[in-house]
Amino acid sequence: MSRDHQHLKVVPARYPARTIGAIVALFILAGVTESVALNPRWEWGVFARWFFDPVILHGLGQTLLLTLLGTVFSLIFGGFLALARLSSSWLLSSLAWGYIWLFRSLPLIVVLIILYNFSYLYDQLSFGVPFTTLAWGHFQTINVLGQFPAAVIGLTLVQAAYSAEIIRGGFLGVDHGQVEAASALGLSATRRTFRIILPQALRAIIPTAFNEIISLAKGTAMVYVLAMPELFYTIQMIYNRNQEVIPLLMVGAAWYLIITTVLSVIQHSVERWLARSVTRDPQPSRWRQWRSRLKPVAANEEISHVRSH
């Protein structure tokens, strides 16, 4: 029986639809690439001249700083909101739910404009006991809420509402038996949260959280309403002056693409690092996958070269 099997020929499965789809996709990609690269109206010379311009790089730095501060503050504030939503106290849970409901309903541009005009509503803020004249100090709002603070606070307030729901969803995704086991060991609520629940919840939180960070990086363009010189506002001011609209918009699109790519690489690395506790053989990185595919090709070329000699 085994001798009969030796004469069997293994025929690889063929997928004609997949091959046709790949050819059509490559044809479309080639057409789009040709139309973009060879069309002089894209003005790639203007694009190259402005790409590393100091003014553009300064706006890029403001965008990155807003993204970093908005991410850090919104995750911290959102973490507290998520814990409040999961609290057994109906008051804390209700207040957190109301905050999340409010700031997920308001557009970011509305929040930014209100914050920028906050000194018109309240010329000064005091610290004291509400509904009494007892106060320990006050300050002028016009001296505090400038362009940059208003942008950071607005991004944080809106993004924290989304971060809170992401973190809460990650916590709810942890099996309840883990919480019960930690309670049986006598761990306090703080140690249960940070030593048992959070490490397991991170694997569910990270992908969605990075999506929100990428959205935040692009959402910083909304602070143009504050006349703050971030990337998009800087590009807008330049093309309003020289009328080179398309190439300058492509400069901004390229920089946003680079930011998104870097964040995606960081996300992939973080996910692989967190997966170490789940699998002994984590999925290799994209670079290693490409190297492993290229090695057999190089080896076959070397063998054929030796045979030819």
Image (cartoon, rainbow, N blue to C red):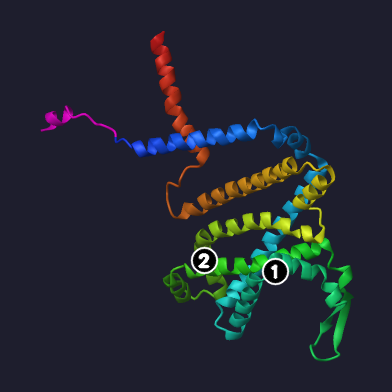
Decide: is 70 above or below 106.
above
Q: Nearer the viewer, mark 1 or mark 2?
A: 1
> Can you say which quadrant of the picture contains the N terminus?
top left
Per the image, the residue denoted by label 1 is 157
Nearer the observer, 91 or 232: 232
Q: Give me the C-alpha separation between circle 1 and circle 2.
A: 20 Å
Residue density around tag 1, few if under 14, some if 14–19, many if 20 or more, within 10 Å: many
Q: What segment is highlighted magenta in the picture? A: 1-12
The residue sitting at 66% across, 65% down in the picture is 159
The residue sitting at 82% across, 85% down in the picture is 128
Relative to 152, 26 lies left or right: left
Nearer the observer, 172 or 211: 211
User: Given the current orientation, which residue lies at the most extreme bottom position?
Assistant: 132
Amino acid at dot 1: Leu
Q: What element carries label 1?
A: helix
Where in the figure is residue 43, as x and y percent of width and height? 73, 35
Q: Can residue 76 be seen here? A: no
Relative to 136, 27 lies left or right: left
Give the label on residue 170, or none: 2
The residue sitting at 79% across, 65% down in the picture is 150
Residue density around tag 2, few if under 14, some if 14–19, many if 20 or more, within 10 Å: many
The residue sitting at 57% across, 51% down in the picture is 267
Where in the figure is residue 35, as x and y percent of width and height? 61, 34
Amino acid at dot 2: Gly
